[in-house]
Amino acid sequence: MMSEPVLSRIWNIWRRPWPLSPAVLSIAVSLLAAYCGALVYLGALHTNLFGHDYFIFLDSGWRVLNGQRPHVDFHTAQGPVFCLYSAFAMIAAGSNLSIGFGIARAVATAAFTVWCFLLLRNRVAPAATLVLCVVIALMAGAPFAPTSSPFTQSMAMFYNRFGYVLLALVILEGFRPAPSSFRSGFSSGIAISLALFLKINFFGAALGFLALSLIVRRPRWGRLAGIAAGFLSLTALFLAWLRFDVAAMVSDLHALAVARSGNLPLHRLLRTVDNSLLAILLLVSVGLIVSALNWGKKQGSLNRLYPVALALATVIAELAVGLANQQDAVFFLMSIGCVLLLASIADVGIEGATQPRSLLGAILILGLCLPIPGALYDLAGFANALQDAVRHRTGQGVPRIDAPELVRQLMPE
């Protein structure tokens, strides 16, 4: 067991205020650059799971590059963001298609990570900011499908990873322990618009978190204006590209909804809840603890209860999005919510609170037990893909697919 001085020291590190030291910032930037460079090197991956998805990516990208528009000119089970990502990957590295997909994933990962850092800088304690940036970078860039084994490799469901990150950005903006503003609202507006044109179920979850943030915290006109400006500006650009054919878009999404409506079995929900029970109890416990610590502050009852509301909302969203994606719980949204709750009490023990810092350190360790396993899971998948790429690098610039079932369909005996 950790001694009280160790726990107290851990807590002191967690609540250390800004600015971030230049040495730590340089190390963080270097690690992100190295990580993104490795993603470029991995390219389109030595795929051994869901290899058929490559043809969906390539077809969508090719159609966009030849002037076609999703929903309007061809059916797509996803939104325009999915197709634009594939098109960018196909032209990013010229004839080296594999590197092109690596560049696309690296650019998206770097953009999401920097977005998170700028959103939280000077508003959330540096330690919590770095933890959240690491979790988001690993979620966006991990080279395997969510809930699959980290010892498989696949570009399948990368859009689900990006959707989870967009939801995380909406949660961080709406519930971070800092006053909201036009700029922060603009961030959420952009994220919600991207979720709409990425995958509709993430858009629905994003609206839920937005509504909850407006209920439990007094809305500011500047934030509301920023949300509207961000959402409407990006949405208008997408709709202009789609020739404002909203009817085609709605028809395409309706067809997808009908197809998915019969694929939400009760046994999957029960299995997901069973597998997630420990994480749910941990997150709700952290929410109750944070609410208790905040109870003595001069604020409204809704504001005191927002930690519990956030915990329950992330649990519900985790289960709902997982079921809609036909996956078990990824634990990502719950991890984001847990770290954010821990960040919200970084000032406890500084301004007149009576709780021993060793107790706060123990609470911190308890809360970090939720995001750390998921981050290590993604990191293990990244390490596995990297060592496999070093052993099997062909330099041919084309995706390498090693999926027996797909091979038998393409080249029957």
Image (cartoon, helix red, strand yellow):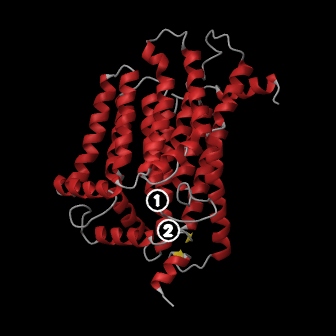
- At x 35%, y 55%, the residue is 260
Residue pushed farthest bottom? 413
How crowded pointer 2 is (Cα within 10 Å; few <14, some 14-19, many 20+) is rated as many
Work out whether 181 lies above or below 112: above
Instruction: Using the image as rendered, state which of residue 272 and residue 285 is in the foreground.
Output: 272
Query: Tag count in the figure?
Result: 2
Residue 223 seen in the figure = yes
What type is the residue that disc 2 sits on? Phe
- At x 27%, y 37%, the residue is 229
Work out whether 250 lies above or below 123: below
Question: For the residues marked 1 and 2, what is the alpha-carbon distance in whole angstroms?
Answer: 9 Å
Q: Earlier in the sequence, mark 1 or mark 2?
A: 2
Work out whether 391 lies above or below 348: below
Residue 93 seen in the figure = no
- At x 55%, y 28%, the residue is 341
- Numbered badge on residue 157: 1
Answer whether labels 1 and 2 touch (C-beta < 8 Å): yes
What type is the residue that disc 1 sits on? Met
- Numbered badge on residue 46: none
Quadrant into which the N terminus falls: top right
Secondary structure under badge 1?
loop
Where is residue 245 drawn, in percent x and y? Answer: 16, 55
Residue linked to disc 2: 50
Where is residue 201 drawn, in percent x and y? Answer: 36, 47
- At x 42%, y 37%, the residue is 170
Secondary structure under badge 2?
loop
Where is residue 29 drawn, in percent x and y? Answer: 59, 47
Q: Is residue 22 left or right of residue 298?
A: right
